């Protein structure tokens, strides 16, 4: 089924406007609550459905497919639970993410553990629970050897390779460069032979994993990474003489266009590209795992912050808001790579009209670079208005950065209330100042003043 991308985008923008107004009317946002994160439940369900439909359309009937949400993109229990209800599993990469997915109610067979630095205890827990694990490197594989010898496990086990297809436009999210820290670098001397032998020696090694990159990677490069992974699986199975690798984990990484409302590229475009470039991938011989993060959630989150002051400095117009580095860390520190669209709302939460004026949208933190946007043409933001940072549902307000001891904002999900309004549900309580103190060593106030080397008195 092909939907109309523009009408989907318009509907999403309309829901967002309704939510901002509802948040102001219902007091989730106001003079005393200066910043919130909002999550569009309808949009999240739509993206999950689009992901499922995109791969259903290209895989042979009966092919097992697990779409595992990369929990790091939006590490919030209610979000993982919502996705679970929509048929989406979880890719986890730390003890915290694993615990969070379990708290969301996910059973072990809906999870994949992928982190690059797993301790022996974490590996043992995953194998005891029966959660799929992708080993990152030969040393980790040796740990799995010992665990598999010690006790039988239901965990499907695989190896992560780096197909070394090169990077994209953002170095920090390029995972398949020549020298990436992730996986076994496939094209290094002797590596391919080592990988083939590793599978030949271990009949229980049944999965092959690659994640070729995140934001900034073009689709063609993602597809090349998947093609190399597929080709390796074919080679390994041929050399072993049986289909030992039964599942390919193709990672995530679909980019999001932060400059526009329309979803592009779509899951359907990516799935069709893979079907063209790697036809054998979907013919039913391999089960599939995907690990999308940003593309599932980014569009559905909005940070809304009150404009505390509007000022002018040396001819520069500045709206000083309550959203900055603490909720949009990447954008503030690397604005060229991570620009965000900003929407202007008035004090009642209605989209602001009026002529566009070039202005800066600043955050509350005490350094001059704390800017959400620089030189942006927007209706003039005034004291008491609201500025919204769009497409911040992944890797933004869920990733609080405690600069200036700024408190974590509350996060609320929204959906139509059935009678023309908006209903909200608490996803994460706002952090209180008392909690900030407690998390900053408040219980240990005299720890340093009373510390003495033993025997010094
Ligand atoms: C971060 C990550 C993902 C998700 O990447 P997105 O760009 O958010 O889709 C998937 N798999 C692994 C192993 C990751 O590290």
Image: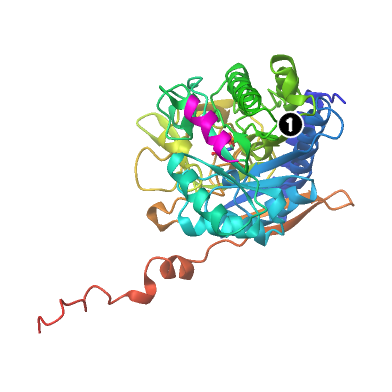
Indicate if the residue with disc 1 has its beta carbon within 8 Å of ligand 1: no
Give the side of residue 18 with respect to residue 73, left or right: right
For residue 197: magenta?
yes
> The N terminus appears in which quarter of the rendering?
top right
Q: Does residue 28 appear in this view?
A: no
SS at mark 1 in the image: loop
Question: Ligand 1 sits in which quadrant?
Answer: top right
Q: Answer whether residue 173 is magenta in the image.
A: no
Front position in the image: 363 or 339: 339
Look at the picture and state if 184 lies above or below 414.
Answer: above
Q: Which residue is at 72% across, 40% downward?
A: 67
Q: Which residue is mark 1?
A: 286
The answer to which of 249 and 73 lies nearer the viewer is 249
Q: At 87% across and 31% down in the image, what residue appears?
A: 61
> Which residues lie in the magenta part?
193-202
Residue 344 visible (yes or no): yes
- Crowdedness of circle 1 by 10 Å Cα count: few (<14), some, many (20+)? many
Dominant SS in magenta: helix
As drawn, is 354 to the left or to the right of 65? left
- What x and y, as percent, mark residue 358? 50, 26
Q: Position of residue 19 (x, y in %)?
A: 73, 46
- Residue farthest toward the left in the current orientation of the protein: 456
Residue 30, percent across and down? 61, 55
In this picture, is 16 found above or below 155?
A: above
Q: Is residue 339 above or below residue 93?
A: above
State which quarter of the image contains the C terminus: bottom left
């Amino acid at each position: 089924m092909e939907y109309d991308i523009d009408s989907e985008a318009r509907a999403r923008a309309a829901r967002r406007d309704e939510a901002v107004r509802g948040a102001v009317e219902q007091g989730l946002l106001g003079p005393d609550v200066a910043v919130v994160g909002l999550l569009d439940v309808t949009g999240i369900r739509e993206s999950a459905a689009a992901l499922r439909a995109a791969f259903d359309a290209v895989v042979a009937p009966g092919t097992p497919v697990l779409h595992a949400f990369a929990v790091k993109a939006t590490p919030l229990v209610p979000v993982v639970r919502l996705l679970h209800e929509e048929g989406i599993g979880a890719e986890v990469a730390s003890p915290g993410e694993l615990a969070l997915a379990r708290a969301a109610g996910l059973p072990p067979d809906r999870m994949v553990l992928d982190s690059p630095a797993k301790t022996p205890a974490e590996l043992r827990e995953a194998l005891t629970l029966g959660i799929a694990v992708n080993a990152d490197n030969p040393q980790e594989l040796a740990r799995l050897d010992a665990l598999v010898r010690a006790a039988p496990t239901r965990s499907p086990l695989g190896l992560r390779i780096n197909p070394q297809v090169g990077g994209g436009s953002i170095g920090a999210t390029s995972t398949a460069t020549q020298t990436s820290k992730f996986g076994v670098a496939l094209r290094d001397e002797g590596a391919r032979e080592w990988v083939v032998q590793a599978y030949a020696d271990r009949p229980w090694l049944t999965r092959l994993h690659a994640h070729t990159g995140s934001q900034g990677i073009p689709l063609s490069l993602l597809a090349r990474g998947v093609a190399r992974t597929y080709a390796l699986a074919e080679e390994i199975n041929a050399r072993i003489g049986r289909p030992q690798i039964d599942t390919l984990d193709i990672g995530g990484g679909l980019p999001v266009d932060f400059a526009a409302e329309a979803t592009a590229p779509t899951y359907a475009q990516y799935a069709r590209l893979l079907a063209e470039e790697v036809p054998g991938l979907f013919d039913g011989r391999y089960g599939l795992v995907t690990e999308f993060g940003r593309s599932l959630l980014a569009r559905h989150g909005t940070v809304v912050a009150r404009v505390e002051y509007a000022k002018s400095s040396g001819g520069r117009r500045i709206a000083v808001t309550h959203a900055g580095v603490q909720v949009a860390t990447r954008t503030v520190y690397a604005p060229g790579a991570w620009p965000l669209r900003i929407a202007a709302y008035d004090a009642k939460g209605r989209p602001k009209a009026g002529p566009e004026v070039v202005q800066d949208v600043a955050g509350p933190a005490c350094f001059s670079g704390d800017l959400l946007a620089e030189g942006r043409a927007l209706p003039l933001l005034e004291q008491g208005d609201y500025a919204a940072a769009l497409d911040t549902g992944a890797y933004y307000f869920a990733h609080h950065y405690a600069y200036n001891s700024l408190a974590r904002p509350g996060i609320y999900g929204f959906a139509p209330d059935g009678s023309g309004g908006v209903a909200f549900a608490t996803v994460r309580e706002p952090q209180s100042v008392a909690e900030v103190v407690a998390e900053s060593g408040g219980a240990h106030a005299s720890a340093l003043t009373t510390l003495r080397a033993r025997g010094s008195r």
